Image (tube, rainbow, N blue to C red):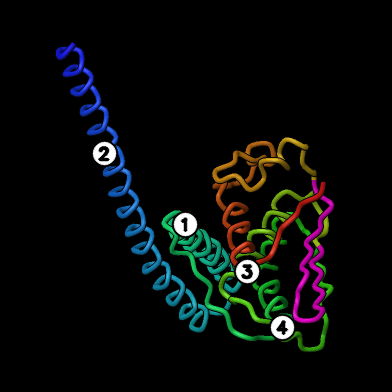
């Protein structure tokens, strides 16, 4: 009996130690990954500043500069999303809200995204009130929410399709709607839409994707005490 108990105790100790080492390695890798992501943002800032300087010195290559800057913008967004996911995983994702003009902010974000529509000649149509819409929100988090939703709508759209962004603000509450006439999704995809690292239609549509954008968007909307729904 004592021998059996000793064997079970040793086995339990070994299993615990293996789990401990696995968790420790996972945490260490997460820290290293976060540090690498931070380090990548610095040279991107330098490349962006250098490109803008070259644009002033030799403006005849405007199209090339625009292409470089657009890709820097997209890569920077991706790296910042990775950092946000790490914060969400560690429970450190927090809002920094301020009262701002939501209409103006939405229009600015959409105009920053508009160059992406050139890839498949998508029309980006805004239905945003001209008058001020004072609302409490986190501008940085809203930028990530809209970027993910609109970029997906563009990415999975048909050639020459359209993406519409609508905003309605009533009694301090905002309703944002992004619609497109793209390829649509199956019921199974809709059920798992906000699952992290979901393998979407990247291969079929010949696009690049990480599977973290919509999961992060869901977390950011919930952080604003909002809700997000998708229909196809």
Side (left or right) of 127 relative to 48: right
* Label 1 neighbour load within 10 Å: few <14, some 14-19, many 20+: many
Q: Earlier in the sequence, mark 1 or mark 3?
A: 1
Residue 206 falls in which quadrant of the image?
Answer: top right
> Disc 3 marks which residue?
224
Q: Secondary structure at mark 4?
A: helix
Q: Is residue 50 above or below residue 39?
A: below
Q: Nearer the viewer, mark 4 or mark 2?
A: 2
Q: Earlier in the sequence, mark 3 or mark 4?
A: 4
Q: Which mark is residue 82?
A: 1
Image position, residue 2 (x, y; %): 15, 14
Side (left or right) of 66 relative to 177: left
Q: Earlier in the sequence, mark 4 or mark 1?
A: 1
The residue segment tinted magenta is 164-182
> Disc 4 marks which residue?
104
Q: Are marks 3 and 4 in contact (CB under 8 Å)?
A: no
């Amino acid at each position: 009996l004592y021998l059996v108990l000793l064997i079970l105790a040793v086995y339990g100790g070994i299993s615990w130690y293996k789990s401990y080492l696995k968790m420790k390695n996972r945490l260490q890798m997460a820290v290293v990954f976060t540090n690498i992501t931070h380090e990548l943002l610095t040279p991107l800032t330098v490349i962006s500043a250098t490109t803008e300087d070259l644009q002033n010195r030799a403006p005849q290559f405007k199209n090339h500069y625009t292409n470089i800057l657009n890709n820097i913008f997209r890569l920077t967004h991706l790296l910042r999303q990775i950092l946000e996911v790490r914060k969400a995983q560690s429970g450190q994702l927090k809002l920094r809200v301020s009262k701002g003009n939501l209409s103006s902010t939405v229009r600015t974000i959409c105009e920053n995204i508009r160059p992406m529509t050139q890839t498949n000649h998508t029309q980006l149509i805004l239905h945003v009130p001209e008058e001020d819409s004072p609302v409490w929100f986190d501008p940085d988090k809203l930028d990530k929410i809209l970027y993910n939703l609109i970029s997906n709508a563009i990415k999975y759209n048909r050639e020459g399709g359209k993406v519409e962004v609508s905003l309605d603000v009533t009694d301090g509450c905002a309703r944002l709607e992004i619609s497109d006439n793209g390829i649509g999704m199956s019921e199974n995809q809709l059920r798992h839409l906000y699952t992290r690292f979901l393998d979407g239609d990247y291969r079929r549509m010949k696009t690049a994707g990480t599977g973290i954008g919509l999961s992060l968007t869901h977390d950011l909307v919930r952080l604003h005490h909002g809700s997000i729904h998708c229909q196809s």
